[in-house]
Amino acid sequence: MQNEATGGVLGAVGGAMIGLVEFRRDLDRDARNASTKASNALAAASSALSGLKTLVTSGFLLRGMVHRVADFDVGMCYPGDETSQEPSAFASNAPGLPRPVFTEEVAVSPQQWPPSANAYTDTGLLQDPNNAIVGQNVATGMALGFAEVRSFLLGLPGAAHPSSFVQAQYFRCANGLGAALQAIAVGSVPLTASQYKDKFLGVFGSSGPSPTGSTTGLASAIIVDGPAYGNSTAETTLTSVVMPAGFLAVGQVAEILLGEVAQGASTLTTRVRLDGAGGTLVGQKAYTIAAPATLRQVINITRRADQGGAEVYEIVTESDVAVTDSISVLAGVAHTLYLTGAWTAAAVGNTVTVKLAQLRKL
């Protein structure tokens, strides 16, 4: 009996020991797994921290956090939230206004460089969404979302990449326009928006008001010296004057005044032609040049009643030869009068320079 009891105790103890060993083995395995997971988590956290450090020092992010750039984004995202006094990611909508209306006041103020910018919270929210327009780039971003602005910009590029020569023309055109506007702005009588509108209507051939914004008066004038035409007997264009489409109503009269300075020892023949250097002759005059002389041509054009869908003009000018005194031209387009010159003999010292080309509605 004692042996059986002893055997039972030993069996129980042995079983407990075996269970304890297995428990210890499982515990060690779990500890190793936990250690591995902790190491992996530490590596992942270290990698994430490294990535976060890279992100917060990224030029892409830093540039996006500049308030002027944020203002542009605000404008592009308009319309945003309803009117709110609380900080917001978006500018408040103007109640009842389908889209912003830009006035001259918005365009010209405030005047500073770099552009004024909105104030933002640390989390990138506009502090005053109801007055977001104070950031100058907000209006710029808004305008780029307008259909007419988009259409205008998309109409500028050509079908192929432009050469440097073409690019130079774009630059010169824009630069010349800017210089002209600056000159007008500092002049004695800056133009109004209505006057600019009338001038563009004339340039693009509208039948609206005259380019000067009135029924009569000076429409265009070239007072810068043209290129000197010299030692040649070939008929050469000296200058031209464009009469915009719709410039004259039936019964109205335009006067074109041309003036040149010539010198040499030969005969100079000037001709006025319509719509091309070789177009219809409407005036011709020969001048014998023996000393420096001032020359002058005056052409009066009267619009008569249209015939067969064409515009009819009566032309009166001094001429040494018989010329056309009435012409029919295509309606609704601009027409150009060209002044040409030709010397009867090519002699050194023969030059003629245009000093004036003027269009006036009488």
Image (cartoon, rainbow, N blue to C red):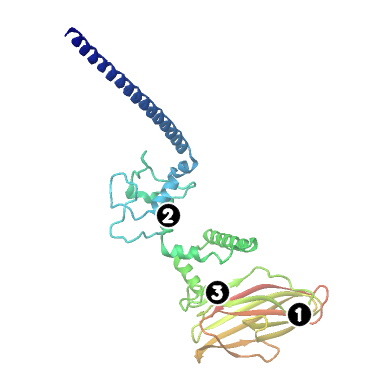
- Return the mark for residue 234: 1
For label 3, count other residues whose C-alpha is less than 10 Å away and answer few (under 14), some (14-19) or many (20+): some
Could you tell me which secondary element the residue under label 2 belongs to? Answer: helix
Q: Nearer the viewer, mark 1 or mark 3?
A: 1
- Return the mark for residue 359: none
Could you tell me which secondary element the residue under label 1 belongs to? Answer: loop
* Chain-order first, disc 1 or disc 3: 3
Residue type of the residue flagged with mark 2 = Gly
Kindly give the residue lying farthest to the top in the view shown: 2
For label 1, count other residues whose C-alpha is less than 10 Å away and answer few (under 14), some (14-19) or many (20+): few
Q: Is residue 116 visible?
A: no
Q: Nearer the viewer, mark 2 or mark 3?
A: 2
Tell me where residue 17 appears, x and y as whole percent: 28, 16
Judge from the rendering whether residue 300 lies leftward or rightward of residue 81; answer left or right: right
- Image quarter where the N terminus lies is top left
Instruction: State the CA–CA distance, disc 1 to disc 2.
Output: 55 Å
* Chain-order first, disc 2 or disc 3: 2
Q: Nearer the viewer, mark 1 or mark 2?
A: 2
Residue 170, image quadrant: bottom right
Instruction: State the CA–CA distance, disc 1 to disc 3.
Output: 32 Å
Judge from the rendering whether residue 145 lies leftward or rightward of residue 181; answer left or right: left
What residue did someone put label 3 on? Answer: 218
Tell me where residue 160 appears, x and y as whole percent: 58, 65
Judge from the rendering whether residue 237 lies leftward or rightward of residue 34; answer left or right: right
Residue 169, image quadrant: bottom right
Q: Are marks 1 and 3 in contact (CB under 8 Å)?
A: no
What residue did someone put label 2 on? Answer: 141
Residue type of the residue flagged with mark 1 = Ala
Instruction: State the CA–CA distance, disc 2 to disc 3.
Output: 40 Å
Query: Which residue is painted at 46% across and 41% down in the image?
Result: 62
